[in-house]
């Protein structure tokens, strides 16, 4: 099981301003079992050479992704979903009315052009 989704790719930045990239480190426990560590690391040292970024930021992927997903799903309250649906319905109904008015104008244009 060495695959990882890397949910935060392109969304995290180091203090130096470079993006963080997904890094997988595989090791073995004393029992011989494989141990995968998933982290996000600063891209600066990888792109420009060792010691380019002084902080060399490393973030645990499992913890940071769990935090972001927890925050995201906490935002999906019944009230927030109801408001989003109301905005979508309002936008759709305005669009439908506009399409209706355009359709009603077409016969007038045809008569005037005849």
Image (cartoon, rainbow, N blue to C red):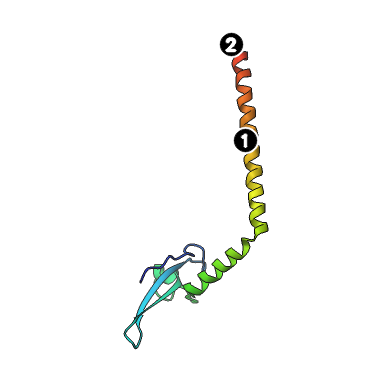
User: In this image, 5 relative to 93: left or right?
Assistant: left
Count of number-bearing discs: 2
| Pointer 2 residue | 114
x and y, in percent, of residue 13 in the image: 51, 67
Measured along the vertical axis of the image, is residue 68 above or below residue 112? below
Label 2: element kind: loop
Disc number for residue 96 = 1
In terms of image quadrants, where is residue 71?
bottom right
x and y, in percent, of residue 38 in the image: 42, 73
Name the residue nearer the viewer: 113 or 13. Answer: 113
Q: Residues within 10 Å of mark 1 (few under 14, many from 20)?
A: few
Mark 1 and mark 2: span between their CA atoms? 28 Å
* Quadrant (top left, top right, bottom left, bottom right) of the C terminus: top right
Which numbered mark, 1 or 2, is in the foreground of this view?
A: 1
Name the residue nearer the viewer: 22 or 47. Answer: 22
In terms of image quadrants, where is residue 34?
bottom left
Q: Residue at x 47, y 64 (%)?
A: 7
User: In this image, 89 relative to 44: left or right?
Assistant: right
x and y, in percent, of residue 27 in the image: 35, 81
x and y, in percent, of residue 32 in the image: 31, 85
Disc number for residue 64 = none
Measured along the vertical axis of the image, is residue 77 above or below residue 63? above
Name the residue nearer the viewer: 49 or 27. Answer: 27
Residue 15 visible in the shown view: no
């Amino acid at each position: 099981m060495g695959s990882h989704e890397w949910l935060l790719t392109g969304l995290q930045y180091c203090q130096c301003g470079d993006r963080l990239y997904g890094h997988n480190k595989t090791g073995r426990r004393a029992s011989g079992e494989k141990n995968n560590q998933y982290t996000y690391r600063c891209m600066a040292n990888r792109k420009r050479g060792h010691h380019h970024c002084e902080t060399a930021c490393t973030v645990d992927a499992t913890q940071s992704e769990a935090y972001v997903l927890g925050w995201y799903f906490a935002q999906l309250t019944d009230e927030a979903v109801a408001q989003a649906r109301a905005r979508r319905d309002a936008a759709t109904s305005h669009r439908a009315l506009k399409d209706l008015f355009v359709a009603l104008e077409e016969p007038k244009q045809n008569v005037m052009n005849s």
